[in-house]
């Protein structure tokens, strides 16, 4: 598994899995220990057999699902299943080993349906930190079978897809919610004003900088580079 996450900080993840084409689906249910082998697609109410079914799914956790944003059930080459859970976090403050470990531990939501008869529950937990980097010296403090992909490794990991909105650490000031806007530290005090103004007209970078200046804030160079 670890070969899939080059440029990430990895601990363990030595399992070997069968890679298959995957379908991405958003679901109604929130992942929990009681989640069954069949879940419900959000937009269609279609039933999806995500454990030991004919199709391999990458599932987007139900709204407000705690600890996990995306999860999958992968087949191990020697039989059995592997649960893959990951979180996507936009965190502007420094993320040390303890902070990263705590977030990863929250992703350890392991449904019983995947391992009904096995005492050893094979799983990999990941953290994609989109706005901050984790100091590499904390790598050994990560939980077993986990990884962190932080901002410093993002471009190398995603390659030509690094500018895609789903992979980008950029903040779209015309669409982001107020919590995400506040991650632009130099203008967080006028976050609500930004939301109000964009209802009247959308920003480009020049008009956004001018608006911030008008409200008494000068956007920092670092924040400016994140604005899309």
Image (tube, grey):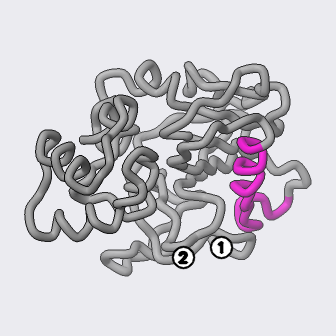
Which residue: 16% across, 41% down?
205
Please state the horizontal and vertical placement of residue 90, each as a whole percent of the image: 50, 48
| Residue occupied by mark 1 | 35
Can residue 35 be seen here? yes
Q: Position of residue 158 (x, y in %)?
A: 40, 27
Q: CA distance from mark 2 to mark 1?
A: 8 Å
On whether residue 90 falls in the magenta region, the answer is no
Quarter of the image for the N terminus: give it. top right
Seen from this angle, which residue lies furthest right?
A: 119
Residue 107 placement (x, y as % from top left):
69, 55
Do tag 2 and tag 1 residues touch (Cβ < 8 Å)?
yes
* Residue 175: numbered disc: none
Q: Give the residues in magenta.
A: 99-117
Location of mark 2 (residue): 29
Decide whether residue 103 is among the magenta residues: yes
Q: Secondary structure at mark 2?
A: loop
Image height check: is 9 above or below 195? Answer: above
Q: x, y percentage for residue 210?
A: 16, 46
Determine the image quadrant of residue 181. bottom left
């Amino acid at each position: 598994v670890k070969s899939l996450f080059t440029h990430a900080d990895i601990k363990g993840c030595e399992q070997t899995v069968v890679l298959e084409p995957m379908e991405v689906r958003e679901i109604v249910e929130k992942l929990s220990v009681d989640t069954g082998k069949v879940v419900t697609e959000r937009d269609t109410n279609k039933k999806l057999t995500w454990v030991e079914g004919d199709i391999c799914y990458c599932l987007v956790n139900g709204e407000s699902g705690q600890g996990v944003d995306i999860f999958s059930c992968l087949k191990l080459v020697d039989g059995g299943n592997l649960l893959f859970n990951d979180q996507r976090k936009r965190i502007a403050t420094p993320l040390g080993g303890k902070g990263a470990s705590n977030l990863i531990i929250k992703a350890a939501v392991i449904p019983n349906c995947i391992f009904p008869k096995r005492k050893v529950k094979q799983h990999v937990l990941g953290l994609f930190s989109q706005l901050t980097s984790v100091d590499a010296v904390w790598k050994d403090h990560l939980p077993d079978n986990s990884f962190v992909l932080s901002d410093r490794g993002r471009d190398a990991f995603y390659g030509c897809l690094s500018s895609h909105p789903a992979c980008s650490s950029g903040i779209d000031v015309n669409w982001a919610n107020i919590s995400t806007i506040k991650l632009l530290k130099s203008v967080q005090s006028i976050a609500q004003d930004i939301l109000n103004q964009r209802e009247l007209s959308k920003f480009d970078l020049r008009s956004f900088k001018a608006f911030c200046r008008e409200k008494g804030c000068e956007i920092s160079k670092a924040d400016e580079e994140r604005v899309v």
